[in-house]
Image (cartoon, rainbow, N blue to C red):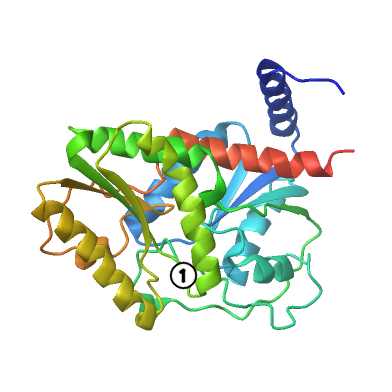
């Protein structure tokens, strides 16, 4: 078996990226939850550098037929025939089945909407969250769909470390608390926490910090959220009562979510930034798209 060095892998990636960007029939469709104007600007800023190399469109919403159709039509009007669909959600399971159905990659839903709706990285009130009825779109494009979630990528390690590094002044007297939206299903929530814990190891390397914790708020499930809020608030209160400075980092695609309300009256520091905007999120989109194209290559 031939062993490839890191430089060889980098060269292959660069050449693959050049080939894709030079091919006028290929494009990238980024699926993002969407939120308020600031949330969307952060995502737009992350995608912007890719527009110099690729035909790129963004489809906001929780696998909404209308926004996906419009994004595909915009790409097709530019001559794009092969589309890498980069699903920029924390969990790879989120909105997967309806997306496959809308894009013609799944014959029917068969009740597969399931509980895999992370609800978001959104900034809109939870009461506004709704799903259009998924309907297949009429298109001749070939779709290459990403399966992994943002939260599983090692690139997130470095983004989290950068966020903490910018806020930290004395690690030995600081606690880092990383908070995510979280799903409703208990088993899936445990998987989220494991991914978050793995990503948080890069933060521990900056320390040693007094402690590094990961939590999910279970935002759209009131009976689970109440317990999570109390636990998160207790973490912060106990730390500050013992003279520890608390750094809050959101484990979200963009924005700070509802954490200001949850932590109201408590002492902590935060910059309110999710993963976007950050150059490594731009890199994640590009790497994910190239991986999609490479799977289809002969």
Residue 151 position in % (x across, y down): 51, 51
Q: Is residue 25 shown to the viewer in this render?
A: no
Query: Which residue lies under the disc numbered 1?
Result: 119
Left or right of 122 in this view: 76: right
Question: What residue is at 27 percent from the left and 67 percent from the top?
Answer: 231
Neighbour tally class for label 1: few under 14, some 14-19, many 20 plus, Cα within 10 Å: many
Q: Helix, strand or loop at disc 1? A: loop
Residue 179 position in % (x across, y down): 35, 57
Residue 213 position in % (x across, y down): 33, 52
Q: Which of the 4 quarters of the picture holds residue 162?
A: top left
Q: Between residues 123 and 113, which one lies in front from this camera angle?
A: 113
Q: Which of the 4 quarters of the picture holds residue 200?
A: top left
Q: How many marks?
A: 1
Q: Is residue 198 shown to the viewer in this render?
A: yes
Question: What residue is at 53 percent from the left and 39 percent from the top?
Answer: 154
Q: Is residue 3 above or below residue 177?
A: above
Quadrant containing the C terminus is top right
Q: Is residue 65 above or below residue 209?
A: below
Q: Between residues 262 and 207, which one lies in front from this camera angle?
A: 207
Left or right of 144 in this view: 187: left
Q: Is residue 2 above or below residue 87?
A: above
Q: Which of the 4 quarters of the picture holds residue 169?
A: top left
Question: What residue is at 56 percent from the left and 32 percent from the top?
Answer: 52
Left or right of 87 in this view: 101: right
Quadrant containing the N terminus is top right
Question: What residue is at 21 percent from the left and 64 percent from the top?
Answer: 234
């Amino acid at each position: 078996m031939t062993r490839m060095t890191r430089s060889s892998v980098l060269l292959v990636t660069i050449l693959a990226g050049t080939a894709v960007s030079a091919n006028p029939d290929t494009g990238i469709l980024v699926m993002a939850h969407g939120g308020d104007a600031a949330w969307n600007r952060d995502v737009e800023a992350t995608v912007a550098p890719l527009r110099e190399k690729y035909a790129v469109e963004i489809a906001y919403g929780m696998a909404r037929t209308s926004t996906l159709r419009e994004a595909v039509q915009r790409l097709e009007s530019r001559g794009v025939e092969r589309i890498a669909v980069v699903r920029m959600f924390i969990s790879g399971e989120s909105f997967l089945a309806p997306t496959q159905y809308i894009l013609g990659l799944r014959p029917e839903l068969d009740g597969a909407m399931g509980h895999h709706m992370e609800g978001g990285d959104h900034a809109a009130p939870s009461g506004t969250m709704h799903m259009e009825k998924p309907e297949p779109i009429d298109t001749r494009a070939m779709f290459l769909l990403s399966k992994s979630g943002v939260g599983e990528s090692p690139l997130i390690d470095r983004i989290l470390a950068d966020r903490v590094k910018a806020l930290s002044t004395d690690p030995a007297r600081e606690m880092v608390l990383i908070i995510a939206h979280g799903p409703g299903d208990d088993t899936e929530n445990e998987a989220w926490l494991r991914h978050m814990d793995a990503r948080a190891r890069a933060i521990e390397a900056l320390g040693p910090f007094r402690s590094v914790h990961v939590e999910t708020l279970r935002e759209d499930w009131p009976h689970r959220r109440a317990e999570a809020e109390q636990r998160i608030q207790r973490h912060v209160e106990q730390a500050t009562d013992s003279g520890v400075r608390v750094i809050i980092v959101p484990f979200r695609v963009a924005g700070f979510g509802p954490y200001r309300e949850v932590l109201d009256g408590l002492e902590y520091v935060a910059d309110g930034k999710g993963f976007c905007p950050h150059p490594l999120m731009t890199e994640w989109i590009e790497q994910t798209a190239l991986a999609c194209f490479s799977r289809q290559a002969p």
